[in-house]
Image: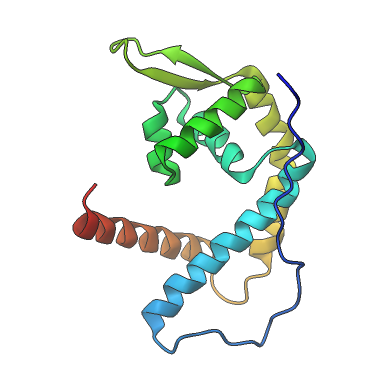
Amino acid sequence: IPARPPFRRRYPEPMDVSGIDIGTGHLPSDIVLGAMRAGHLAERTLASILRPHDLTPASYNVLNVLHRAGRPLCPSTIGQLLLVTRGTMTGLIDSLERREYVVRIPHPEDGRMTLIAVTPAGTDLLTELGPAHRKATAEVVAGLHDGDPEDVASTLAGLQDAMDKWLLAHLGD
């Protein structure tokens, strides 16, 4: 298998945009747009940590979901948790499998299905990345102006739940 070139996603250069109001004047819209922007910035933060390991945030998230689950999972379950399509999930698993971070194993009850399991190499990579990831996220959270980080986490979880419910009600599963 030919080596693939290192991952290099192009992000705009960081710049100070504090003081620039991009709000809509509609609080619910501003909350959702702010959460979206925070998500993009979180992805950039994670990408900077992962870049030396030639890993994408999406690939890291697959490894993290499998590791935290503590058991093999169906690709569709991982995709649903990460909000990615079946095709994207296949590509992520193929890439991680080539690098021996995950393996496909037969489903014990349904021979048509496979499960994805993190390998010891994948676990070792997560262990190696852990300190840098925790340090970066701690630095980001330390920069919060007001409020308790647990309140922020709870609010974000509530926003995610509300969005999930809206999507189910309006788009089905």
Query: Which image quadrant: the N terminus?
Result: top right
Q: Residue furthest front?
A: 2
Residue 72 placed where, x, y %? 45, 22
Residue at left offset 50%, top offset 35% = 65
Residue at point 53%, 28% (across, down): 93
Colour theme: rainbow
Write down the quadrant of residue 156 in the picture: bottom left
Q: Residue at x 55, y 68 (%)?
A: 37
Q: Is residue 65 above or below residue 140?
A: above
**Residue sitting farthest toward the right:** 52
In depth, the one of 73 and 173 nearer the eye is 173
Residue 84 located left or right of residue 59? left
130 or 6, nearer to the observer: 6
Q: Is residue 126 above or below residue 152?
A: above
Q: Residue 45: horizontal and vertical position, in percent? A: 68, 56
In the rendered image, residue 21, in percent from the top left (x then y), is placed at 58, 87
Choose between 154 and 54: the one closer to the eye.
54
Q: Quadrant of residue 143?
A: bottom right
In the visual, does 127 lie left or right of 35? right
